[in-house]
């Protein structure tokens, strides 16, 4: 399959899953949920440069663990763990592409403030529910995804930054809906931002480390 045709196919199947595929049977829903991620991994693989580095392989592994997380999220802790591992591979991949800038370093402050405020709301909600056992894994996940977002910013790569921010938005909506209060159109908002996040991260794979793709702050 030609790589330039994959984005349209990814978009089409994502729309099919989000808006058309019914919730039951669950096996059908899960199949169509995973297809866009499998295509995104294919897209990333096809965009690998001739000179492959640790950055590229770590990013691909991260995509793989996130796909596992998609398939197992109905067992929440299992899926959360897979996503956590995926974020650790992402941030390690981004670590190899750090480009120092005082403005990018300063971005850690708003990320920390958001994580603390949002995390405190989640922990408070979990503490007042029957899900106290989730406080530790959820807290660990917040630290991991916040770190991933900051590490992404430190690369200076626009696609990585956009993907990481969309990932934070997607997970924030999902967590708020699950533990704090219902969010209107939660499924549409979560999955559209999630697929977009993974696509932009995958799209960056051939450009990470190239000087001309970095945002200069």
Image (cartoon, rainbow, N blue to C red):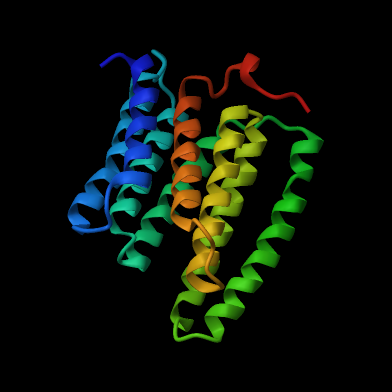
The N terminus lies in quadrant:
top left
Query: In the image, what residue occupies the spot 51% across and 66% down?
Result: 177
Q: Position of residue 109 (x, y in %)?
A: 77, 52
Residue 103 left/right relative to 33:
right
Which of the two residues, 24 or 119, is positioned nearer the viewer here? 24
Which of the two residues, 8 or 65, is positioned nearer the viewer here? 8
Query: In the image, what residue occupies the spot 22% across and 46% down?
Result: 31
Residue 41 left/right relative to 59:
left
The C terminus lies in quadrant:
top right
Q: Position of residue 46 (x, y in %)?
A: 34, 20
* Number of numbered discs visible in the structure rendering: 0
The quarter of the displayed image where residue 155 is located: top right
From what the image shows, is residue 2 above or below residue 21?
Answer: above
Residue 95 left/right relative to 154:
left
Q: Position of residue 196 (x, y in %)?
A: 48, 37
Query: In the image, what residue occupies the spot 52% across and 20% down?
Result: 207
Query: In the image, what residue occupies the spot 39% across and 60% down?
Result: 81
Q: Position of residue 80 (x, y in %)?
A: 40, 61
């Amino acid at each position: 399959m030609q790589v330039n045709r994959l984005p349209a196919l990814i978009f089409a199947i994502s729309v099919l899953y989000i808006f058309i595929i019914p919730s039951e049977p669950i096996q059908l829903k899960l199949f169509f949920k995973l297809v866009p991620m499998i295509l995104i991994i294919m897209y990333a693989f096809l965009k690998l440069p001739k000179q492959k580095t640790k950055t590229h392989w770590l990013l691909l592994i991260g995509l793989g663990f996130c796909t596992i997380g998609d398939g197992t999220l109905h067992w929440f802790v299992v899926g959360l763990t897979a996503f956590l591992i995926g974020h650790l591979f992402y941030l390690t991949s981004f670590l190899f592409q750090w480009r120092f800038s005082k403005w990018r370093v300063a971005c850690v402050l708003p990320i920390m403030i958001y994580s603390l405020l949002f995390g405190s709301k989640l922990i408070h909600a979990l503490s007042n529910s029957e899900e106290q056992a989730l406080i530790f894994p959820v807290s660990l996940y917040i630290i991991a995804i916040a770190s991933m977002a900051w590490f992404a910013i430190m690369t200076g790569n626009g696609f990585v930054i956009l993907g990481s921010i969309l990932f934070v938005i997607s997970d924030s909506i999902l967590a708020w809906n699950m533990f704090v209060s219902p969010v209107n159109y939660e499924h549409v908002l979560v999955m559209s931002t999630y697929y977009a996040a993974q696509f932009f991260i995958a799209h960056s794979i051939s450009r990470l480390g190239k000087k001309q793709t970095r945002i200069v702050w």
